[in-house]
Image (tube, helix red, strand yellow):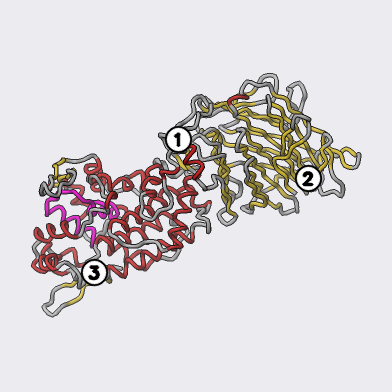
Amino acid sequence: MALTEQSSANGQNVLAFGEYSPGLSALSDSEFLGSVRWRSATDRDLVRAARDGDVRKFAKRWLKTAIPSGRGDQTPSGPSDGLLLSRQEYFSSQYHPAVVELLQYIAKGGQHRPQRPKSKKSPKAAQSVISVDQKLFGSNWTKLTAGERSPAAADLHGMLQLLSLPNISWDHEPWFRLWRTALTGVCNVLAIATSGRDGDPAIEADDELLLHGELPWQASLLFRDVKGAAKIRRAARKLIRCELEDRTDGDGTPHALLLPRLGYWLTSLIRCGQWADRFREELWDDDSSIRFNDLMQYAFRLYRPSGELALSNGFAADPQPLFQAASQLPGSDFKLSDVALLSLPGAKSSRNGKKAKPSKAYKRISNRLKWDPSSQSDWADLACLRSNWQRESDSLVAEFHENLPQIDMAVLGRSLFRGTWDLQLSLDGEAIGFEPRWEAICWNSDEDGDYLEMQHLLPDGGRVERQIWLSRTSHFAVLADSMSGLAEGTLEYTARLPLADGLSVQSDSLTRECSVKTGPVLTRIYPLFLPQDRVYSTPGGCGSYEDALVLKHAGAGGGLYVPLVLDWHPGRRRKSCQWRQLTVTEDGRILSGDAAAGFRVQVGPLHLFAYRKLRSTEHPHSVLGYQTTDETVIGDFDRDGDVSPLLLVE
């Protein structure tokens, strides 16, 4: 995948995709151009200008024949449109200052010169043409292009973007300097990348895709007339498809390891698709096309109205342009038009946390939209609980491939928790360690809500389960930790829920209720495992410490259940609240808290019931007259005071 210098009959150097020759930099521009080998189908005038070493004529012919303008309505309206996903914020590596200067110049519009229609018979809309002259190539470009050292992959990527843009008027000398540097640099970098690729785990997924997939893919399209480009293109296409398959589940779910840099990785894939469209080259086969569409749908689940992707802390750019670009790719089933009114800015949003009246367009689109807003993958160690596709939906993303789960929770579209859901346990004063052994043991999604249960098996035979229930209709959630199967002793528990940036916890003076305000949205927090009134002493607590909501509890025996209810319904923010722990019996005998636990909480019209069995028994358990053999029950009380289950886990 690099350049080879061969000796022809007259002793001249020959340049083609093959092995890199470091002596190429010593050639003059005419000699360099005359040494390039071309595929047989290359434009004759282009080949003639190259063999004659006529740089001016070659540049003019290349710009006329080698740069496609696009397809139909996908034609860029101006040069800067093609740079949207090549701006620095959508790229993980830093560009060289010379590349940055030129990219910014073109992105800002440069010096415009209108391009008029050639004739009145075939009028076309006037397009903006940007002039790039010698003055823009100063000392930074001299440093970048001088010497034997090849530019970095990031700089070569920027050069390819510049060379591929339509509607730019170049001076031939700076253009050829850019063209020559890009061609030799790409081939050199690809030779090193190909020979050194060994699956280094230290290389980030987006860097891997750029170096071994996107860069050779774009180079083989832009320099498609250079001999050997077709072989590079086939290899790059294969790698891009493998990257997509290896890093996503069968339903398109990206692996949890990918989330911190998912935006960069997606951007690279989308740019590959854009180049395939512009150069009329197929990138995906039927299976990979379906996988790519599913991936974009899943990524859309992670979108936050604040312009972020959930748990994508390493990607600071707004992902909205990614979704727009993906939806415009030919053959894409991911049509942003179906969800634009529901989620992206411009959708009809609510005010002061109150639900806005849906428009006719919203009703029509939401009825047609068949994607489930929630999803879970065992392979990816990832789950997304989401109430709906609206912009101000409730959602919680959880990944559990590390020692402790990571969560990203939003209420009415506003971030509440983000980061590691920490857990510390000790038995009789001795700390219990955790390893990356979490797995999802239960997933349920229906019209009432989404439920995820994660389990961690402890070395001594005990186990920890983390439960998440998110209502789809009533703006509340239940988060709980269940410890069971441990040796008899005093079990001490501490958990930390990481608050989103800028948030703080407020504690009620009379009760143990807490609250967090995110803009106009107030989230009320009810620690059901603690007595409601502060006059009753308890070894536990619920409050704020170092930008986190901290929960503490302790109990005797081999088990403990710690449920937390979060409520952010605008209509219940001023309603009085009552909660208490319930008595659980088995065959007329009262059970201790390490065997089973039940709770109730009432906030206005919301009256919830939560139950967890911590120890296997032969007989059904009874709580407030409700008989059950299930391990977990989450429900509400009807008007007659009977429990109506929302969730049953056997």
| Amino acid type indicated by mark 1 | Ser
Q: Nearer the viewer, mark 1 or mark 2?
A: 1
**Label 1 to label 2: alpha-carbon separation:** 40 Å
- Residue that label 3 marks: 21
SS for dot 1: loop
Task: In this rendered view, identify the residue nearer to me: 588 or 219.
Answer: 588
Q: Is label 1 or label 3 in front?
A: 1
Q: Percent position (x, y) of residue 396?
A: 57, 41
Q: Position of residue 18 (x, y in %)?
A: 27, 71
Query: Pointer 2: what residue?
Result: 614
Q: CA distance from mark 1 to mark 3?
A: 49 Å
Viewer-closest of 351 and 587: 351
Q: Secondary structure at mark 2?
A: loop
> Looking at numbered disc 2 in the image, what kind of residue is underneath it?
Leu
Q: Is residue 131 above or below residue 31?
A: above
Q: Residues within 10 Å of mark 1 (few under 14, many from 20)?
A: few
Magenta stretch: includes residue 297: no
Q: Which residue is mark 1?
A: 306
